[in-house]
Structure formats: structure tokens, C-alpha cells
Amino acid sequence: MNTQYVKDFVKDLFTLRTVWIDKGSGKWAIKRRFHPVLRTTFWVLAVIVGAGIYSSLNNPEHSVAVADTSTVAALPEPEELTPPPVKREELVIPLKASSKRGEILLPSEMNPETDRIIAPSALNKNLTSLEKAPAMPQITAGKYSVDVNKSTYTLTLYRDGEVVKEYPIAIGKNPGDKQRIGDHRTPTGNFKVVSIENASGWSHDFRDGKGKIKGAYGPWFLRLDAKGWKGIGIHGTHDPDSRGTMATEGCIRLSNEDIAELKQYAYKNMPVTIREN
């Protein structure tokens, strides 16, 4: 290849050219431009660089990588992850009450009565001793379960068969196992928690002339699979003084503080035993 020809071409390539541009109406303008090959090369490189920048900014994989990095950075150290693996929670929107078979009812929305059967005063002595129970231990992994003794008005929380804490409760107004809807009896047997529901906005009319009471179920409602009986569960109350008595329409009633504490240990399918004594 002729070396001089190459030198001349390179020199010509980077030499500004004087070009007359026709602007119309007999007017001309002088422009100084590089060689067409060099200008074409510049434009091609500019398009390639611009396309690369646009692609990197709009690439989904790029966005995911950034999101993942921030998420990992926000996570606590492994030793700070204290909640137990068994703790699970479901927030279920309260369903409209109904008296028809096959429809889920709100707890205790079944022909409530106003009479209350007060337990013998001797049984109320348990309430004072239970309220002095030790504080709950730190939540740790393990299989939790609940035992309800209707005769002593106590709910006992177990972890792997060991007692964690006892709570004073109120039970159904009438004694014995539940026989029919509206009989105000607490059913007995082996059940399980089917859902953990936020009851803070629920209200209920106890047919005592006071109308609907907001917060009648406290902050949480642990719904039970109670042999097909609808609306049976463990919940809080607006009337904590009813604990230690037969006062409910079939549910198991704790103070709001106690149900909030118990809820930390509850999970779906947690075993619940309810017995007469």
C-alpha cells in the first residue's frame, strides 16, 4: 500500500473543509466541516453510546439489583431475628352476621340473652391468684398449645407440654357442652385455631338496652374450628370484671391485655382443648 496515499487520506480526514451552503433566495453561507467519513463515524459512535446508556437505565435487571442491595442492607443481624418460626398470623375481614346454615357468623351473634349466671364466690378466688402470675417469658421457638378448664375459669398456655402462663377467663352463661345455636354454652373438645382476626373495630349488642358496644371483642379474636359451631373463639372484652364467671354467649373471654399477649404466641392450627374440669 502506498504510504503517502495513507498519510494524505488521514490528513484530509482531519482537515476542516470549507463548504458553501445554499440557504435559499440566493443566499449562501460558509460552513467549516470535517470529512464526511469522520462526521459519519462520530454520529455512529454517539448513537451507540446513547443507546447503551438508555438501555442500562431502563434494564429491569438493573432495577432489581439495586432493590435487592438496599433490602439486604436493611436486614438486621441474624442474632436479632427473635420471632418464633411457628408464629403465623392472618388478618381476616369480619364477615357479616347471618343466622342461615352454611354462612359464617360473627362471634356470638346468635340471639344473645341478658341473664348472667355468676359463679360461686369460692371460684372467684382463683382470679386474684391468677392475676399475680409471672410475666411472660421471651418468645422462643416451640410448639404452643392452649388448655381451657371451664370449672376453674382458666386458660393455660403450654410450650412443648410445659406451662408458660395461666390466664383468668369468662365462659358461656350456661353449663355443659354446646347443644344448639344460641344456647350460650361453651363447646368442649379438641379444636384448633383457624384464623387470627383483628377485632378492634367490631361491636356487639348484648340486648341489655345499651345498644351496640364498640370493642366488645377487644383487639383480637382467635377463631376456633369448634365442631362446626360458628362464631366460637377466644377474644378480649370491654368488661374485664366478668372474668371468673359464666358470662359469655359461648366464647372464651380474656382481658384485652391478656389476649394481646396470647396473640403473640398463637398461630393457625394451634391446638386448643376445652374441658369441663
Image (cartoon, rainbow, N blue to C red):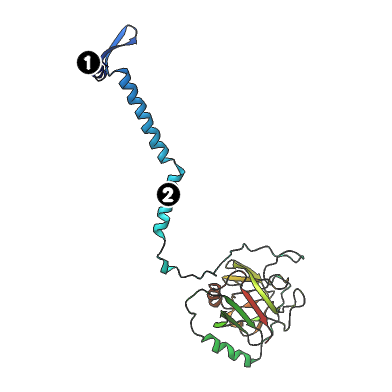
Residue nearer the viewer, 237 or 260: 260
In the rendered image, is residue 214 in sight?
Answer: no
Seen as rendered, the residue at the extreme bottom is: 122
Badge 2 is on which residue? 65
Give the number of the disc on residue 255. Answer: none
Q: What amino acid is found at the position of numbered circle 2 in the picture? A: Ala
52 left or right of 212 in image: left
Find residue 68 and report its horizontal and vertical position in percent: 43, 53
Find residue 85 and report its horizontal and vertical position in percent: 52, 69
Badge 1 is on which residue? 4
Q: Quadrant of residue 130?
A: bottom right
Lower position in the chain sequence, tag 1 or tag 2: 1
Find residue 247 and report its horizontal and vertical position in percent: 66, 81
Seen as rendered, the residue at the extreme front is: 1
Q: Secondary structure at mark 2?
A: helix
Residue nearer the viewer, 98 or 211: 98
Please report the residue visible at 65 percent of the width from the left and 70 percent of the height from the top: 204
Q: Quadrant of residue 21?
A: top left
Q: What is the number of callouts on the image?
A: 2
Q: Quadrant of residue 258?
A: bottom right
Q: Secondary structure at mark 1?
A: helix
61 w.r.t. 99: above or below: above
User: For the residue carrying disc 2, how many other residues have a C-alpha within 10 Å: few (<14), some (14-19), or many (20+)?
Assistant: few
Q: What amino acid is found at the position of numbered circle 1 in the picture? A: Gln
Find residue 159 and report its horizontal and vertical position in percent: 55, 79
- The quadrant of the picture occupied by the N terminus is top left
User: For the residue carrying disc 1, how many other residues have a C-alpha within 10 Å: few (<14), some (14-19), or many (20+)?
Assistant: few
Seen as rendered, the residue at the extreme top is: 26
The answer for how far apart the CA atoms under marks 1 and 2 are is: 54 Å
Please report the residue visible at 33 percent of the width from the left and 24 percent of the height from the top: 41
Residue nearer the viewer, 215 or 11: 11
